[in-house]
């Protein structure tokens, strides 16, 4: 386990970097949480590697065409090696032990106009039960160098909106639950993951038509919200368990659910049908895939529907009333427990939908995908003002835009960090959030 | 509560506290606390709007007024627990504006709360000890070395025990404060406030929620504070108590000081009676004269 | 509706059907500390009942215990002969009891119209005609239905709160200090509204600290002292009773 | 089934440096959460700063162990200040969100390729213990008895770790019975009351945040000593585990976090060992070895929920005190 790569060098610059990290760690930034790894069990017959027992293998293709001469490197556990793809686009690298490695595709060796999906040129890979591990990179059409700065900004803004909209779906549910019950629900992440996992189960594993799988996933998400409230949260409210205790219970629930997912679905990432469609729809400088368009469309329609629900329907207004003043709502004849039940169902449904869209946006479905964006969702809710549904929307759009646009000047693997730093800074100056009000009545 | 009060001895009232006729904002011979133009609004509601008020030294001053008159808010402003929109106020000649609550307390202005804030999971004795100021062991580093603070702590404990005896809580000293009754908590809170040898004690509704059996001892304690040279300012609803022990009464209504004076005289004041019973109007809302009702409605419309 | 004739404060023996009856109720918040001690009260069909008394006498607690917000430890509360002691608020609403708290009595982030809609939550079909009825009593609201309640002043909030309670078409209305925090002119307005509401046939029980105004408009008053109903009588009688004033200002004490 | 191995492995956890590290981190959280009422969800961040604050100067600058330790502690204090200044005046749940976010910011920063020359990125750093090992007085070799047979190096880290835990517990005990501890506990109960008694609540909260954070930092060093520093150790899940330990042992106690850590790891090891062997033996045909490993996390999650609801005082907490925090 000797680190062979890094030899201690006492350069002044390194020392400054170190200081920078230690002292202003909060203002710097990092890498995206675990990148996607495609695990397809065994791929078609790889060239045998004699040297080592364990090996990574892959096939680099773009739109059905094999790409030759693409540089792949493997690093980790003090070992590193590199290879180039052969004429069929295949590559294989042997490694000495069963451990975690980083597999990197050198983007510069790709042909013009082809790029690896955002932030996924490096993949952390680990062996499963076999001695062979397939590592795939998702390639797309893109102009890495040739795009001018303004066009990049526009592209990022559109992408940020897309991301912000899907965050908003999750954030509004979280915010409504917080508003009506006071609970900071850490298990919201698992509601997000649940939606995507259900589409995976029905749409891929059971091979149902996608539209049906999505509908079933959403129905099951809503049912999960109903069950959680009926079986867990309502009894705890009845017992008069304090809010901080409830928050810790939600952490326990989050942990239990997350690893239950891992238990049943494993640690790998899978793709939903159509997740890797090329971005071939152009609006000026902006290139989008059909999935992006549908995703944004669905988000906007659903958000409008939620807004309509909250602003125009009787139950929606009652929901806001309970958030505002639960005792008064009860004194007006509103059954507060029933409203909270509805909020849980709605929140879980929206989270499930957000999960499905997130599975397409990342792209990939994995057991901890919700947890990866949980903090962004919390940041969005806090930014907008705890407990205000429309604040959550605004906060989400800000976080989404910031995350995407910041990749223009931050390395793409640091984009989440920026949003979290913004959260801390905003709390410093406006703790009630952007749309939060400090109202004192009477 | 009130009718059970049977004073052991008639309290000695301080007189001659003010200069000139008693009126809102009247000058005091020896004021300890002076507030000027203190105003606090919540959204559209003005909670406190006090032009000028002085609290006389070494006397018991009652702050009275109907619900929502802004008494507690005024308390919070004076003690640094809330910030006014405008205004200035000083304690023993030192301005208190922008001074955080803990420093106000260190200057010798100690308050209690309407809803008792006894520290439930600390013992009664720990509650008391917390009240003492300038404790060496409250510094994190010196706290590590018991020999540095042990002696002082013992002195504090003796003092606390003394006070607890006076407040008849000594038998409970090792119990959790949470196990005390509402009245005992009030006593504890007052006793705790005394641990720091304050010059001005501000009590927010000391009688609220107190078992009638305890009210007499509470009253005696308050009188005792004055006897020991402290100044007391308290908010209270119980008029019997106010008349019985207060040397001076300040009446607030709708955030303003509407009257000040000797307790017996103030109760005759038309403004006070109005504040409590509602303004004395010549018109009678119950009158059958519908034309009259219309007139009031017009008046209301004009105001809008 | 015995009180539809425009005779103010009719000095008559209550004869209507018994609507609300509070029988020897003992209640409080903290364990071991009772705020109400064996307190009784009755309200007959169409009556306007005022509950007055010094601060801390337990006026609001009495009202809250009727509405099930404070636990009744002893005694019982009856609505038209049916026991409603410690019933949950939304059940009481269904039985036609409306309640207007003193503070926090509107939904600040909802518009005025939405606040009113919440009042009629259990009977959404009644919305339209109740809205007409309420805006007749409170014409000012009509122009401002879209305004957010959180931006209203104290008096306006009180108006919205009363309207919200009226939306459900209550048989009995419980008002906790409708004049609190209002300027004198606004207070008068509030009292007139209460009277108007009562005249429309709603049996009303109101707690007030503005004893004079309250007694002027109400049919009967109860004076509370230390959690008990100390005196009762018609509003007029109590208004001129020196004992009442003495109770407020402590002039009845033994230390004179 | 090899019961000997199962019990043996569980017995090792009884005294392992990992148990010591978790105990110390939990003790830090006890100061934050149990005694002061601060909701710090970023203990993993403090631990990370300990690990990297030690390893980076040791590896890249060749500093002696004490200088590395000081660097860690300094970084931790700065981190606590950055967290505390904006949030300690706000409601408790803001601190929770900010601390968990800040800990993630740290983890991601130390994971990124951008600083790989310094941080070693996802692969982390190793072999930074050399200077400390020169202090190892134990003769080379493996010794011990029963299941506790380790190398001299492992014994060294183990003994060092537990000495630090004992010192920290002693320190906490001294502090909590001092007037300082009284103020801290008063703040947990009602900070306005303490403020009204003339105590600078903000400053005390900050001191508590720093002290508990320093415990976490040292715990981070103890935790990584026997292994390499890898950023993925310091996931939010780490903090949640420490909370589970704290709640299990009793949040407002001094021995609770230590006992909690021992019970937690012994039970967890026993449970995982048992399940793994059971799968091996074919008793649980529906489960793979990998799945058996994941079962422990599910168990921890469920345990957190059950403890909070049914045993909020923990093993050592006073049942009368019950509410470990309001």
Image (cartoon, coloured by chain):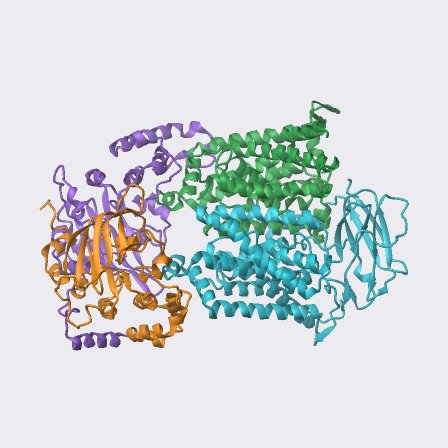
Relative placement, left or right, of A290 versus C63 is right
Quadrant (top left/top right/bottom left/bottom right) for the N terminus of chain D: top right
* Chain identity for the colour orange used in the image: C
Q: Quadrant of residue A162?
A: bottom right
Relative placement, left or right, of A139 versus C200 is right
Name the residue at 82% across, 65% down.
A62
Looking at the image, residue D80 lies above or below residue C171: above
Looking at the image, residue C175 lies above or below residue D302: below
Asked if residue C150 shows in the view, the reply is no
Camera-nearest residue between D52 and D236: D236
Residue B274 is situated, as x and y percent measured from the top left of the image, at: 17, 61
Camera-nearest residue between A151 and C138: C138
Residue C94 is situated, as x and y percent measured from the top left of the image, at: 36, 61
Q: Colour of chain B?
A: purple
Asked if residue C202 shows in the view, the reply is yes
* Chain identity for the colour cyan used in the image: A
Residue D297 is situated, as x and y percent measured from the top left of the image, at: 63, 43
Q: Colour of chain D?
A: green
Camera-nearest residue between A272 and A95: A272
Relative placement, left or right, of C55 versus D260 is left
Name the residue at 40% across, 65% down.
C121
Quadrant (top left/top right/bottom left/bottom right) for the C terminus of chain D: top left
Residue A397 is situated, as x and y percent measured from the top left of the image, at: 58, 65
Tag count: 0
Looking at the image, residue D138 lies above or below residue A66: above
Camera-nearest residue between C228 and A63: C228
């Amino acid at each position: 386990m000797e680190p062979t790569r890094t030899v201690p060098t006492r350069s002044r610059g390194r020392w400054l970097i170190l200081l920078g990290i230690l002292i202003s760690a909060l203002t710097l930034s990092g890498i995206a949480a675990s990148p996607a790894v495609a695990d397809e069990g065994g791929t078609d017959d790889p060239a045998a590697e004699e040297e080592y027992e364990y090996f990574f293998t892959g096939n680099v293709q773009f739109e059905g065409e094999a790409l030759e001469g693409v540089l792949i490197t493997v690093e980790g556990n003090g070992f590193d090696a590199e290879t180039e793809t052969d004429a069929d686009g295949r590559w294989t690298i042997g490694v000495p032990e069963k451990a975690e490695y980083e597999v990197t595709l050198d983007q510069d060796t790709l042909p013009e106009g082809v790029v690896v999906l955002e932030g996924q040129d490096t993949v952390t890979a680990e062996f499963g039960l076999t001695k062979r591990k397939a590592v795939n990179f998702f390639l797309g059409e893109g102009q890495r160098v040739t795009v001018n700065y303004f066009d990049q900004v526009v592209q990022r803004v559109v992408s940020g909106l897309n991301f912000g909209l899907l965050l908003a779906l999750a954030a509004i549910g979280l915010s409504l639950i917080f508003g009506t019950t006071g609970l900071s629900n850490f298990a919201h992440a698992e509601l997000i993951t649940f939606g995507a996992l259900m589409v995976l189960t029905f749409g891929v594993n059971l091979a149902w038509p996608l539209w049906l799988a999505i509908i079933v996933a959403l129905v099951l998400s809503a049912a999960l919200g109903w069950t959680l409230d009926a079986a867990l949260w309502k009894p705890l409210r009845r017992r008069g368990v304090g809010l901080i205790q409830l928050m810790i219970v939600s952490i326990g629930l989050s942990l239990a659910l997350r690893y239950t997912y891992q238990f049943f679905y494993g640690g790998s990432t899978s793709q939903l049908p159509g997740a890797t469609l090329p971005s071939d729809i152009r609006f000026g400088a902006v290139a989008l895939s059909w999935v992006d368009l549908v995703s944004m469309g669905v988000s906007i329609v659903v958000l409008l529907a939620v807004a309509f629900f909250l602003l125009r329907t009787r139950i929606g207004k009652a929901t806001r009333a309970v958030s505002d003043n639960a005792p008064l709502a009860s004194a007006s004849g509103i059954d507060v427990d029933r409203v909270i039940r509805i909020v849980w169902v709605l929140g879980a449904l929206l989270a499930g939908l957000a999960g499905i869209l997130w599975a397409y946006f990342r792209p990939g479905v994995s057991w901890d995908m919700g947890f990866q964006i949980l903090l962004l969702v919390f940041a969005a809710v806090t930014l907008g003002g705890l407990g205000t549904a429309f604040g959550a929307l605004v906060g989400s759009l800000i976080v989404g835009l910031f995350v995407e646009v910041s990749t223009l000047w931050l390395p793409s693997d640091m984009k989440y960090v920026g949003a979290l730093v913004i959260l801390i800074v905003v709390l410093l100056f406006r703790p009630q959030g952007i749309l939060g009000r400090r109202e004192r009545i009477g | 509560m009130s009718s059970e009060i049977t004073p052991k001895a008639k309290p000695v009232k301080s007189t001659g506290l003010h200069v000139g006729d008693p009126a809102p904002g009247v000058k005091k011979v020896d004021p300890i606390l002076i507030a000027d133009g203190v105003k606090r609004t919540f959204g559209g509601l003005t909670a406190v709007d006090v032009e000028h008020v002085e609290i006389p030294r070494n006397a018991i001053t009652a702050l009275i007024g109907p619900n929502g008159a802004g008494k507690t808010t005024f308390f919070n402003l004076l003690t640094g627990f809330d910030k006014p929109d405008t205004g200035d106020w000083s304690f023993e000649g030192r301005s208190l504006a922008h001074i955080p609550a803990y420093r106000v307390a260190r200057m010798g202005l100690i308050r209690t709360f309407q809803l008792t804030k006894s520290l439930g999971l600390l013992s009664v004795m720990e509650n008391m000890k917390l009240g003492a100021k300038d404790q060496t062991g409250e510094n994190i580093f010196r706290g590590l070395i018991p020999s540095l603070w042990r002696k002082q702590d013992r002195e504090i404990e003796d003092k606390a025990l003394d006070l607890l005896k006076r407040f008849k809580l000594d038998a409970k000293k090792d119990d959790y404060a949470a196990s005390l009754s509402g009245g005992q908590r009030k006593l504890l809170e007052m006793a705790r406030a005394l641990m720091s040898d304050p010059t001005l004690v501000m009590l927010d509704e000391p009688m609220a929620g107190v078992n009638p059996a305890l009210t007499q001892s509470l009253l005696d304690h308050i009188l005792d504070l004055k006897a020991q040279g402290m100044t007391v300012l308290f908010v209270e609803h119980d008029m019997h108590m106010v008349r019985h022990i207060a040397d001076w009464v300040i009446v607030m209504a709708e955030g303003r000081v509407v009257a000040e004076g000797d307790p017996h005289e103030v109760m005759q004041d038309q403004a006070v009676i109005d504040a409590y019973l509602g303004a004395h109007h010549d018109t009678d809302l119950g009158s059958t004269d519908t034309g009259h009702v219309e007139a009031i409605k017009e008046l209301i419309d004009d105001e809008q | 509706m015995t009180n539809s004739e425009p005779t103010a404060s009719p000095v008559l023996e209550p004869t209507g059907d018994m609507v609300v009856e509070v029988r020897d109720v003992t209640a409080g918040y903290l364990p071991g500390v009772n705020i109400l001690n064996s307190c009784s009260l009755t309200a007959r069909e169409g009556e306007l009942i005022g509950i007055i008394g010094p601060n801390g006498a337990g006026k609001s607690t009495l009202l809250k215990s009727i509405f099930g917000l404070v636990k009744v430890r002893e005694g019982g509360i009856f609505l038209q002969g049916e026991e409603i002691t410690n019933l949950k608020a939304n059940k009481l609403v269904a039985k036609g009891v409306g309640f207007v708290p003193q503070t926090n009595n509107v939904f600040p982030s909802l518009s005025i119209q939405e606040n009113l809609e919440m009042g009629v939550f259990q009977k959404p079909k009644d919305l339209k005609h109740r809205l007409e009825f309420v805006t007749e009593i409170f014409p000012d609201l009509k122009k401002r239905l879209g305004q957010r309640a959180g931006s209203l002043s104290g008096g306006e909030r009180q108006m919205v709160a009363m309207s919200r309670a009226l939306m459900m078409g209550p048989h009995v209305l419980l008002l906790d200090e409708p004049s609190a925090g209002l300027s004198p002119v606004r207070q008068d307005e509030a009292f007139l509204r209460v009277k108007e509401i009562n005249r429309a046939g709603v049996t009303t029980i109101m707690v007030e600290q503005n004893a004079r105004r309250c007694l002027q408009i109400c049919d009967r008053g109860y004076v509370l002292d230390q959690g008990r109903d100390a005196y009762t009588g018609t509003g007029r009688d109590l208004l001129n009773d020196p004992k009442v004033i003495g109770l407020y200002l402590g002039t009845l004490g033994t230390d004179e | 089934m090899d019961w000997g191995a199962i019990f043996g492995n569980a017995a090792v956890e009884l005294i392992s440096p990992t148990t010591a590290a978790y105990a110390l981190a939990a003790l830090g959280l006890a100061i934050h959460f149990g005694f002061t009422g601060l909701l710090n969800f970023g203990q993993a961040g403090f631990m990370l700063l300990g690990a990297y604050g030690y390893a980076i100067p040791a590896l890249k600058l060749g500093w002696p162990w004490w200088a590395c330790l000081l660097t860690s502690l300094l970084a931790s204090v700065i981190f606590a200040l950055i967290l505390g200044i904006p949030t300690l005046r706000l409601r408790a749940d803001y601190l929770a969100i900010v601390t968990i976010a800040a800990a993630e910011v740290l983890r991601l920063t130390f994971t990124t390729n951008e600083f790989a020359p310094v941080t070693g990125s996802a692969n982390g750093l190793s072999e930074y213990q050399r200077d400390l090992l020169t202090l190892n007085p134990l003769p080379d070799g493996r010794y011990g008895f029963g299941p506790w047979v380790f190398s001299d190096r492992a014994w060294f880290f183990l003994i060092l770790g537990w000495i630090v835990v004992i010192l920290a517990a002693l320190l906490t005990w001294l502090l909590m019975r001092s007037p300082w501890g009284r103020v801290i506990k008063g703040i947990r109960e009602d900070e306005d009351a303490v403020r009204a008694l003339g105590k600078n609540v903000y400053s005390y909260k900050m001191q508590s945040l720093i002290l508990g954070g320093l415990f976490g930092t040292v715990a981070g060093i103890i935790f990584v000593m026997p292994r390499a520093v890898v950023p993925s150790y310091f996931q939010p899940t780490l903090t949640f585990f420490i909370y589970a330990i704290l709640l299990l042992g009793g949040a407002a106690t001094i021995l609770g976090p230590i006992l909690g850590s021992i019970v937690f790891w012994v039970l967890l090891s026993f449970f995982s060992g048992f399940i793994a062997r059971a799968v091996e033996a074919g008793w649980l045909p529906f489960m793979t070895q990998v799945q058996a490993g994941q079962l422990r996390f599910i168990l921890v999650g469920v345990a957190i929920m059950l403890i909070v609801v049914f045993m909020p005082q923990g093993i050592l907490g006073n049942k009368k005190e019950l509410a470990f925090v309001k």
